[in-house]
Amino acid sequence: MVSTVESCQPTQKSLPPKTGSKRALGHLWSWCKSPWIQYPLSTLLLFKSDELIHLYEKRFLLPTNILSKSDRGKIDAAKLLFNRVGHEMNFANTDKLEVSVSSKFFLNAWTASHRWSKNPRVYLSDTILSHFSTEQLKGVFAHEVSHIKNNHMLITGFAVIGISGLIDFTAKKVTNKYFPKKEDKKRVIKKNLVMLGVELVGLTACAVIACAIMRQCEYNADWTAAQDPEKCTSLRNALSEFKRLTNAPTPRFWGAFEDHPSTDARIANLNKLCPAS
């Protein structure tokens, strides 16, 4: 007579098999998390960022059909001035420079373009167009052309991509070193909390470093524009007008998270480059 020995251990319930759609989504998610996909895709989006941003900004642009004749004349004059400033600064694609007037910001001028952009574009708030003189606009355009010529958008973007990748790599190394195996639920939760803490510290450092790079890019754009004494004076007058209209305070503790230097610091720097007569 043969006796059968039954196991006293409880039987484990097997997980239900993944369906085809869940399996495909899992493979897609793993594929998207791969650095071989993330970084080339981020680089492509960075080079196309000006076109993507323009698609978003279109809804804030002032429609020409509701503008008065004088306002349309100001926009046309600003475009001609922008092209002339680009030509004077030896920008290669002067005929492709474009100006868009937006109602989104109270007082701002900015660009997301680089020297290889299809249509380098500068965004102006309608307040700048109505309050700044032609001479002051010339300084603003000289500053923005300097950003485009020096590829400041790409420099900042690549710095953020590189620092973010380093943070992700460091967080995984730290957690894998101290939590090599997923043993129980408490250990998994502790591992996730440690990884979250490392990434939060890293992201804060990334923000501080990225803002420092952007502030340096602003100084560099001022320096490039100030190589022409006339444009240096125009930019200094534009910053003085900006300060008068905004009455912006000088940042203190949170200055590390500011993407622009204080207006006073920029004016003082321009005074060194081209002393006022």
Image: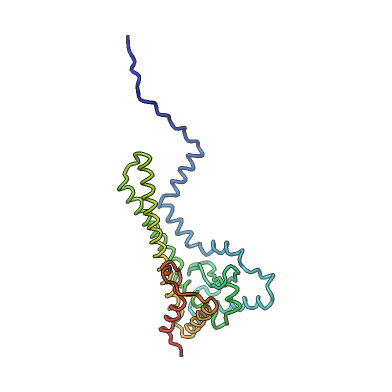
Q: Quadrant of residue 76?
A: bottom right
The furthest residue to the bottom: 277
Q: Quadrant of residue 187?
A: top left
Q: Position of residue 242 (x, y in %)?
A: 53, 78
Q: How is the image coloured?
A: rainbow
Classify 37 as above or below 140: above
Most foreground residue, 37 or 10 = 10
Classify 50 as above or below 250: above
Q: Quadrant of residue 62?
A: bottom right
The furthest residue to the top: 1
Q: Position of residue 47 (x, y in %)?
A: 48, 62
In this rendering, the count of numbered labels is 0
Classify 192 as above or below 50: above
Q: Position of residue 30 (x, y in %)?
A: 43, 46
Most foreground residue, 38 or 237 = 237
Q: Quadrant of the N terminus?
A: top left
* Residue 155 visible in this rendered orientation of the protein: no
Residue at (48, 79) in percent of width and height: 89
* Residue 47 visible in this rendered orientation of the protein: yes
Q: Position of residue 58 (x, y in %)?
A: 60, 64
Most foreground residue, 163 or 186 = 186
The furthest residue to the left: 177
Most foreground residue, 159 or 252 = 252
